Amino acid sequence: MVLPRIGLPTYSRREDENDRFTLYAQYVDGVRRAGGLPLLIAPGSSVESRAQGEHAELFDFIDGWVLTGGGDVDPQAYGGERHEKIYNTDPERDADELVLIRTILERGLPALCICRGMQLLNVALGGTLCEHLADADECADVAGKLLHRAPPRQPLRHAVEVDPASRLAELLGETRLDPFSWHHQALRDVAPGFEVVARAPDGVVEAIESPDHPDLICVQWHPELSCAQDVPQQRLFDALVARAVRKRRRGSA
């Protein structure tokens, strides 16, 4: 049996003494437990290489994607404003992954979009982001009422309520969660065609889905941080890999 191949974009290049690309191993572990073959894809291909078909070759080879977390989306990508709390922006990574997202949508491929991944998907389809939740009354019932990460930049748990009628609730098998959160930005204007299916107690958007894209799983929290012990969170990876298997079978039929 050929394992379904799951692409995972790495974080931006770390231009330190080791000059490296990195990604937290929990993403890889979640894919492996689900029965997928994780393949790390480094960002940074040039505009020329994208135009010459580098991404086309990737999509002929990869069956599904995990759009990973990482640094903030550059506000220029969605007409936002600069904020002193924005960090680790990488326009090259943004451009690279926007191409990935648009191709995922065009081909109807399965994808699990996590934190930054969901934010960038929203931007790709015309949505916008809150630059910093603590200052964004329009994104939460009371700005800063609920911490979505621990100071200075550490994950923490908080409650999430999932719409019982959503596909996400069916996947998780639960509607009340306590997952790990690790963000200071969130969705402001939700992209056309998507609806909010989960929120934090302060009203912050925690998940979206669309009837036009049934193989997208989009969550603001970080399932990879707890999925080794948390069955509902592992189900998100399981669902991705199961859909990638179906995609592979359709392609070989």
Image (cartoon, rainbow, N blue to C red):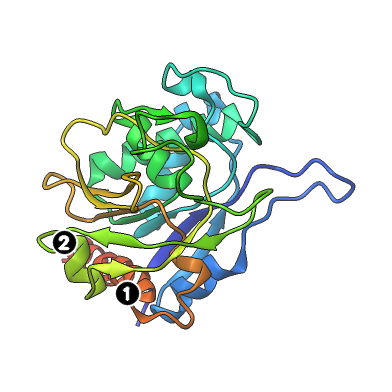
Residue 26 position, x and y percent, is: 56, 70
Q: Secondary structure at mark 2?
A: helix
**Structural distance between the alpha carbons of marks 1 and 2:** 12 Å
Q: Secondary structure at mark 1?
A: helix
Residue at 46%, 19% in the rendered image: 80
Which of the two labelled residues, at mark 1 and mark 2, occupies the earlier sequence position?
A: 2
> Vertical placement of 175 versus 115: above or below?
below
The reply, left or right, for residue 114 in relation to residue 107 is: right
The amino acid pointed to by label 2 is Arg
Q: What is the residue that sits farthest to the right in this orientation?
A: 17
Q: Nearer the viewer, residue 218 or 200?
A: 200
Residue at 65%, 34% in the rendered image: 87
Please name the residue that numbered disc 1 is placed on. Answer: 235
The amino acid pointed to by label 1 is Arg
Q: Quadrant of the N terminus?
A: bottom left
Residue 251 position, x and y percent, is: 22, 60
Q: Is residue 249 visible?
A: no
Q: Quadrant of residue 128?
A: top left
Q: Quadrant of the C terminus?
A: bottom left
Badge 1: few (under 14), some or many (20 or more) residues near its Cα, within 10 Å? some
- Tag of residue 167: 2
